[in-house]
Image (cartoon, grey):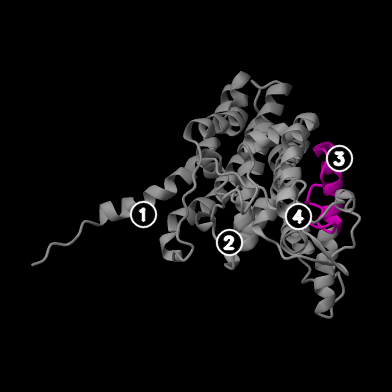
Amino acid sequence: MAEQSDPVPSRLAAIAPALPFWLSLGLVPLVWLGALQGGLWVLLPIVATWYLFSALDAVLGLNLDNLDPQTGEDQLFWYRLVTLIWVPLQAVSLFGLIWYVSRAGHLNGWETFGVFFGIGVLTGTVGINYSHELMHQKNALERWLGDLLLAMVLYSHFRSEHLLVHHRYVGTSRDPVTARYNEGFHRFYPRVLRQSLVSAFKAEAAMQARRGRPWYHAGNPFWRYAALQAGMLAIAAALGGWIGVGLFLLQAGVAIWQLELVNYIEHYGLTRKHLGDGKYEHVKPRHSWNAAQKASNWLLINLQRHSDHHYKPDRRFPLLQTYAEDEAPQLPYGYPVMTMAAMIPPLWRRVMNPRVRQWRARHYPEITDWTPYNRASLPPPR
């Protein structure tokens, strides 16, 4: 009788490659530890997310390996699972800490602020990023989970803006999220907050119009967004009263700031060539900044392989491909370092403006006047 193969080693072999992407789960106990201990412990999630992963990037270097993009769904279970279980973990942590901190007598005002600033780093760096992965999938459950994550930070319209506006108009004047050359983050941030909400609503209203419906039709997802966000605020109020609502708003504000910092660096100064008559070239790998740093790609589930994401938006994160410098521009550091640099505009311009100019000379030597692109004054794409 032939011996049966041991399923344990084969199971471990399937799990092992996915395990580094589970490191984000380690941030959850750090938030709870900060709330329980107070003091400098409240800084743990911030230190881990921004500085520890930056240090790991420096030590571990780059990951230039690509999985076979034809890998089947059945082989991606352990990669997908981390994005699915994050949703209840985030909900329990967010609302559990609203209940706990609003009653905790050992935390002063600054410590309370620190705890929920750390939660905002969590819900922004990880939660919104995971919602981004989920919203791109065809599975209805995953899309709903993505909506729940966005509602927890009061940024539900990001789904509409991202899918209907950003992916279609990236690198053009019609995309609010494409940061203009020489536009500092402190100018970009208020602009994108205002324009993204408006563009998302207009995109959904246009979708309803194409279906012969008014904008206020029940099929407009903005009704769902409003209901989910109101529900989240109601839970916060029920658990912590007005203090709970304030803490919820604090973490949401930090999370949105984290998201837009990432949006800022992903396409800074990169524009698609205007072909005339409101037409632009197709999106190519060259229109997104990439970073191959290993540890920050673990934390951000390969978000830094951003060129391939725009090439294949529904491709699951483990299958995203990395590109060489001649195909896609590369950031000098991973997102944690680059987002910190973005908060200091003179430093950002010193690091990134020469790279944008080199990118222009490499890919578009025929364009001698970039003024219209810099001012985003070209005709909007049709």
Dot 2 falls on a residue whose secondary structure is: helix
Question: Is tag 2's residue or tag 3's residue first in the polypeptide sequence?
Answer: 2
Q: Nearer the viewer, mark 4 or mark 3?
A: 4
**From which residue to which does the magenta span run?**
171-198
Of mark 2 and mark 1, the one earlier in the sequence is: 1
Task: Categorize mark 3 by other alpha carbons within 10 Å: few (<14), some (14-19), many (20+).
Answer: few
Q: Closer to the N terminus: mark 4 or mark 1? A: 1
The residue to which callout 3 is attached is 187
* Residue type, label 3: Arg
Percent of width and height locating residue 279? 82, 68
Q: Residue furthest bottom?
A: 212
Q: Label 2 belongs to which residue?
A: 142
Q: Which residue is mark 1?
A: 14
**What amino acid is at disc 4?**
Tyr
Side (left or right) of 231 relative to 325:
right
Residue positioned 88% across, 53% down in the render:
376
Disc 4 to disc 3, C-alpha distance: 27 Å
Instruction: Provide residue 33's location: percent of width, then percent of height.
Output: 55, 28
**Residue hosting label 4:** 364
Counting other residues with Cα less than 10 Å from the Cα at mark 4, is it few (<14), some (14-19), or many (20 or more)?
few
